[in-house]
Image (cartoon, rainbow, N blue to C red):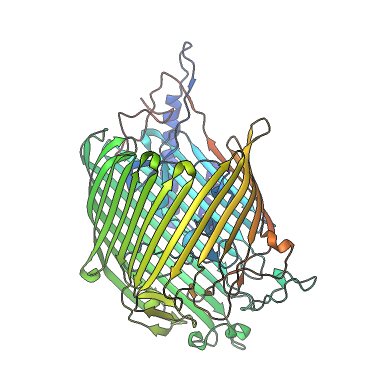
Amino acid sequence: MQSKCSIWRFMVRRVGVPAVLGRVIPFLILHTVCCGIVVTAFAQQPASPTTRPVKLPDEPLLITFALSPERSTPAMDTLPDTDFRMYDPARRQVIDWGTLGNLGSSARPLLFENQARRGFEVGVHAFDLYLLRPAQLGFYRNINTFSDASFSQGRNQFETNLNARFARTFADGINFSLEYRTINNLGQYRYQRNKHNALNVGLWVPIGKRYDGFLIYTRNVIRQQENGGIVSDAIFGSGQFSGPIAAEIRLPREVAFTRIDDQWLQYTQHMRLLGKGVTGKRSLRATHTIAWNQQKYKFANQGSLETGLGADADFFAPTFLTDFRGIRHFVRVDRIDNTFTINTFKTKDRGRPSDLLSLGLAHSYFKVNQEPRVFKVPQNLFLTGNLSLTPSEKFAFTAQGALGVLDNIGEYQLQGDLTLGLGKAGEFRASLLSQIRPPGLLFDQLYVSKRQVWNNDFAKPVENTLSATYALPFLGLEATARAHVVNNYLYFDQNALAAQVTSPLQVTQFLVRENIKWGYLRFDNTVALQQANRDDVLRLPKWFSKNSLYFSGKVFKKRMLLNAGVDFRINSDFRPDGYYPLSWQFHLQDSLTQQPYPWIDLFASFKVQAFRGFIRFENCATWWDKTAVFYQTARYAQPFGALRFGIAWRFMDSNLRDETETPNTPTGIGSNPTSRPIGPRGRP
């Protein structure tokens, strides 16, 4: 008990769980654990002498999410593949995102994309890769206790990242789930440390056979030291003290920093009004979600009464130097969401409804403190709809829509996805995104040190994306064509000022992925092309290539699965955007052009039972050329060659069953009485 209290004190102090939750959640967890101990004690009474425990076949690890308990998906596999050895979230994307040259730093997609956004928002997305959301928390629908942890480290203990997940189902189907992520990376250049913490913790409580409740708490803390990039890369390779740490930085006082604090408390409840939830029968369900969210964004560069910002003042344009004593940009948003839907669906297979139709209403209330301006957005109201048709594994169609009303009249969002299986001829997929949304807050209003810098009245962007994909799985081939059209495109110009272009921005993309297998050799390839009609407002590479050539096979008497080889990436020349930490935005610049740079990583990854590990040396090009520098963001150089290792381990409790026991699954809406049990324990 003492160890559990110590763990909770760590969460309160280090992760930042609010005091009121620090009193309530431990009680809920303790109550749940006690119930689980009592029920488990009864369920595990010794069997009769004539009965022997029988090992169950491997059960699939199924994930259910709070907003759709009728649907389950298999968990990710534990292979030593690309997703495992690419520990950096920016490099796990189909095409790598551009960063500031440090793990966990501000990032943006280099392959253009329109993101689905609806209603009022602040407009800060540079750290989206590292944030957790309540909707992302998976509840693992197995009676077995499940835990999964991964850890990687670079040159020292100040370059680490950790990911951990834990789930346990207790008596009456009560399920506890936790996900925790942390990044702590000092970086190779001066004053560029990133330290992030993200926590997702929740309880799934089914009551009877008709009610399910999901309580989820989420906390994200982003901390980034802001060095403004390096002044010059001419010193590299010119002497003994010519490494990254010797480079002069553009914010030399080393006091500028960013802190973002984002937390959620969400409760989702489902009540089945009609139907028993059995296979082949239709159900009618009411769903209500209420969520509280608080966002805090802060940039600060504290000066002094005598010298002000000193040398740091040269980094900022005069427009932003509103106070001699220093610079501060602070925004706080308090938000309350209420969503209500009526859903009808029919379950064909366990965890996969054959059809679903829902209609609802979504309302959000905002109170914003944009120092010194305080205002409210009381009406953020949308009518919502969702249609899903999945009659077979060869056909799937989903469509989601939202229509703004009252103050949001004229806004809408429409998303659609189609999958069509063609048998031996492959598979066809198509997707659509169309939306009209308001500009983010920071495009319209910006205050620095409590003084207004700009007050704009931009038109609402109209964004459309259409995508089509054809795949031949037996050849490992997939080709995608995608078109983006944006009217009233918003961006930040060469002076880091918000701007808008009224003529349409058009981006055409073509992407091919092919994974070739030849005996023990694997050759994975991704090639992308993109072309925009407005190079004056959008400057991205025109082509990309990501390739991996490696050995894959079992070694040491077939007890270890080993992947060993080389990862390679390169893109065309382009003029990378700069980054302005004051507003957390990427912006145009005209002073630097990045030429194609061959980035080469050597790696070895392996798996032995449930244990995985990797070791990789990144940016091998620095072995033979210590003067060339790679920029994905202007003046923010990517790191020189370095070694990194990582390990991961997935744990499941004993999968033994006494034949006198009756397994139990969660008894709420997501359960399926006619299905085969998915765990070894429970109450009769």
Looking at the picture, how far across and down is residue 101, in whole percent? 60, 66
Looking at the image, residue 415 sits to the left or right of residue 199; the answer is left
Q: Residue at x 49, y 83 (%)?
A: 495
Residue furthest right as drawn: 240
Q: Say how many tags the image has.
A: 0
Residue furthest front as drawn: 425
Query: In this orientation, which residue lies closer to the viewer: 93 or 377?
Result: 93
Looking at the picture, how far across and down is residue 32, in whole percent? 41, 39
Q: Would you say residue 606 is visible in this rendering?
A: no
Q: Is residue 637 above or below residue 650?
A: below
Q: Would you say residue 110 is visible in this rendering?
A: yes
Looking at the picture, how far across and down is residue 11, in whole percent? 51, 53
Residue furthest top as drawn: 50
Query: In this orientation, which residue lies closer to the viewer: 206 or 103?
Result: 103
**Residue 383 falls in which quadrant of the image?**
bottom left
Looking at the picture, how far across and down is residue 608, in whole percent? 62, 36
Looking at the image, residue 466 sits to the left or right of residue 163; the answer is left
Query: In this orientation, which residue lies closer to the viewer: 461 or 249?
Result: 461
Q: Residue at x 38, y 79 (%)?
A: 500
Q: Quadrant of the C terminus?
A: top left
Q: Is residue 399 above or below residue 606?
A: below
